[in-house]
Image (cartoon, rainbow, N blue to C red):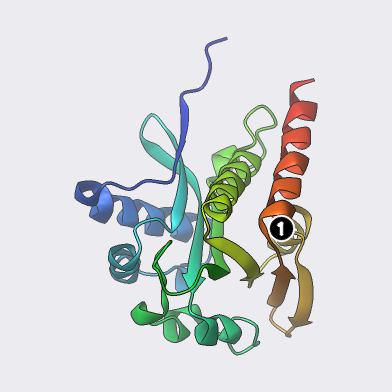
């Protein structure tokens, strides 16, 4: 059987940014409630602030999944740990940091969204979710060894699946829950911790091959 031409990339070329952010918004609306999807205008502005916020999975140049993370300045990151947090209102453009921005070598990372096309969500032979997490962790380990390490991360999953992902793959702990199925997760991390999580993902992928 011919291998599926899957590509996972952390790079969005400037001349493809508008189209790619439209694809990101479209897939988010397909998977989630439309009201929770971040608009393409905001996505493109955030891309201009830091073009390396996404890890994209594509087959035949069609977006089938992505992880979207945002390195935030400390004061705004603290807001992600509060139940009233609203990423559309609380994340102002100036709060988004660039990797290796020279301000501080320690990074606080907000896991904004993790989306996989429904057609690929249950493909045992092609675990897009695991491959995306693996690529994200590889990048974070590389950044850490280059002197720009993520020391803490947070997430605001709105489903049971999302809660499982941040607990299982990022080793986060639930801080609080509200009455609308929203939960705040937080974890302390470092390069060694991320390497251990990467090894765990690798073992899961090996088991799927056997």
- Please give the count of numbered marks on the rendered protein: 1
Q: Is residue 199 left or right of residue 13?
A: right
Residue 116: horizontal and vertical position, in percent?
55, 48
Q: Between residue 171 and residue 191, name the one nearer to us.
A: 191
Is 31 situated left or right of 48 in this image? right
Disc 1 on helix, strand or loop? helix
Q: Residue 129 placed where, x, y %? A: 62, 44
Q: Residue at x 58, y 44 (%)?
A: 138
Question: Quadrant where the N terminus lies?
Answer: top right
Viewer-closest of 77 and 56: 77
Residue 182 % position (x, y):
68, 77
Residue 157 visible in the picture: no
In the picture as drawn, the residue positioned furthest to the left comes out as 15
Residue drawn at x 77%, y 80% as measured from the top left: 175
Q: Residue at x 34, y 58 (%)?
A: 51
Density class for disc 1 (Cα within 10 Å; few <14, some 14-19, many ≥20) is many
Q: Position of residue 23 (x, y in %)?
A: 35, 51
In the rendered view, tell whether residue 68 sits above or below residue 131. Answer: below
- From this view, report whether residue 179 is shown above or below residue 194: below
Q: Which residue is mark 1?
A: 170
Residue 186 vs 54, above or below: the answer is below
Q: Quadrant of the C terminus?
A: top right
- What residue is shown at x 46% (from left), y 86% (from top)? 90
Whether residue 196 is visible? yes
């Amino acid at each position: 059987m011919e291998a599926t031409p899957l590509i996972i990339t952390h790079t969005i070329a400037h001349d493809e940014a508008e189209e790619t952010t439209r694809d990101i918004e479209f897939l988010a609306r397909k998977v989630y409630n439309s009201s929770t999807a971040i608009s393409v205008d905001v996505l493109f502005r955030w891309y201009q602030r830091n073009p390396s916020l996404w890890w994209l999975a594509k087959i035949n140049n069609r977006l089938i999944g992505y992880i979207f993370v945002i390195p935030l300045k400390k004061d705004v990151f603290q807001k992600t740990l509060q139940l009233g947090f609203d990423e559309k209102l609380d994340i102002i453009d100036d709060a988004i940091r660039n990797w290796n921005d020279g301000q501080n070598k320690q990074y606080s990372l907000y896991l904004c969204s993790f989306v996989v096309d429904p057609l690929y969500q249950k493909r045992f032979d092609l675990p897009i979710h695991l491959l995306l997490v693996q690529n994200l962790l590889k990048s974070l380990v590389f950044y850490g060894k280059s002197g720009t390490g993520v020391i803490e991360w947070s997430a605001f999953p709105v489903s049971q699946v999302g809660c499982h992902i941040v607990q299982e793959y990022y080793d986060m702990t639930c801080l609080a829950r509200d009455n609308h199925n929203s939960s705040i997760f937080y974890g302390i991390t470092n390069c060694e911790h991320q390497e251990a999580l990467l090894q765990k993902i690798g073992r899961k992928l090996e088991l799927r091959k056997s």
